[in-house]
Every structure is written in C-alpha cells, then in structure tokens.
Image: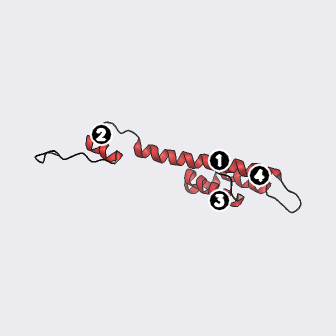
C-alpha cells in the first residue's frame, strides 16, 4: 500500500468505492455515515493538533485499499472464472495465442 496522501482525497476515494459497492443508495448505508462522522470528529482545528487524525487517515487508506482490491478481484473472477469445458480455440484466445492453420484448410 502506498503512503497516504491528503485526507480529503482519501475520503473522496473511499466514498467513491462505497458507491461502487452499494450502488445508488450508498448514502443511506451505515458505512457511509460512519466514515463521514469519523472524518468530521478527527479533523484538525486551530485549537488542537489531533494525532488521531493521522491514525484515522491511515486506517481509511487501508480500508480504501481493501475495497479497491475486492472490487478488482471480483472483476477478475467474473472474467476468468471457469465456465465448464472450453474449446482449444477459446483457451488459446484467452491466453493470447492463435492456433496454427492445418495444411489443406482444415482449421
């Protein structure tokens, strides 16, 4: 995982991933409300420097990495998951090869 960037950028990316996971009704989800409440509670003000801000930011960046990885894993699983027996032409196309042409036009 890369070093965390700006907290606002992390918050926006985290909310974007929640939108991907929950669909249109992501604003009604408890995860959305929790993330916003946590970021509001741990923001830095002029009166205090909150060390928990960095901890929250690191946890949010870690959770963002998890959500992205799960989404990408599901996409790869849908694409490459076995669908039963495949023909040799399909298997060759899947890995980027072409089967050689047989002499006499048989293939």
**Mark 2 lies on residue:** 86
**In this rendering, which labeled residue sits more in front, label 4 or label 1?**
4
Of helix, strand and loop, which one carries label 1? helix
Q: Earlier in the sequence, mark 1 or mark 3?
A: 3
Q: Above or below — where is 81 with respect to 64?
A: above
Tell me the residue that label 4 is attached to.
54
User: Badge 3: few (under 14), some or many (20 or more) residues near its Cα, within 10 Å?
Assistant: few
> Residue 23 falls in which quadrant of the image?
bottom right
Q: Disc 4 on helix, strand or loop?
A: helix
Q: Is residue 6 left or right of residue 87?
A: right
Q: Residues within 10 Å of mark 2 (few under 14, many from 20)?
A: few
Count of labels in the image: 4
For image coordinates 55% across by 54% down, the residue present is: 20
Report the Cα–Cα distance between label 4 and label 1.
14 Å
Tell which of 93 and 42 is nearer to you.
93
- The x, y position of residue 19, in whole percent, is 58, 55
Residue 66 picture location, percent across and down: 60, 46
Q: Does residue 82 appear left or right of residue 2 in this picture?
A: left
Q: CA distance from mark 2 to mark 3?
A: 42 Å
Assess whether mark 2 and mark 4 are in contact (beta carbons under 8 angstroms).
no
Which type of secondary structure does the marked residue at label 3 adopt?
Answer: helix
Disc 1 and disc 3: Cα gap in Å? 13 Å
Q: Say the numbered circle drawn on residue 63.
A: 1
Q: Which residue is mark 3?
A: 12
Q: Nearer the viewer, mark 4 or mark 3?
A: 4
Measure how far apart labels 4 and 2 are at the Cα level.
50 Å
Quarter location, residue 77 = top left
Between disc 4 and disc 1, whose residue precedes?
4
SS at mark 2 in the image: loop
Residue drawn at point x = 64 percent, y = 51 percent: 2
């Amino acid at each position: 995982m890369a070093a965390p960037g700006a907290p606002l950028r992390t918050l926006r990316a985290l909310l974007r991933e929640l939108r991907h996971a929950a669909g249109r009704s992501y604003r009604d989800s408890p995860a959305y409300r929790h993330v916003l409440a946590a970021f509001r509670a741990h923001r830095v003000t002029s009166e205090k420097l909150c060390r928990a801000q960095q901890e929250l930011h690191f946890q949010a960046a870690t959770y963002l990495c998890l959500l992205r990885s799960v989404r990408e894993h599901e996409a790869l699983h849908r694409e490459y998951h076995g669908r039963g027996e495949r023909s040799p032409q399909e298997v060759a196309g899947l890995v980027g090869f072409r089967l050689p042409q047989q002499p006499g036009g048989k293939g």
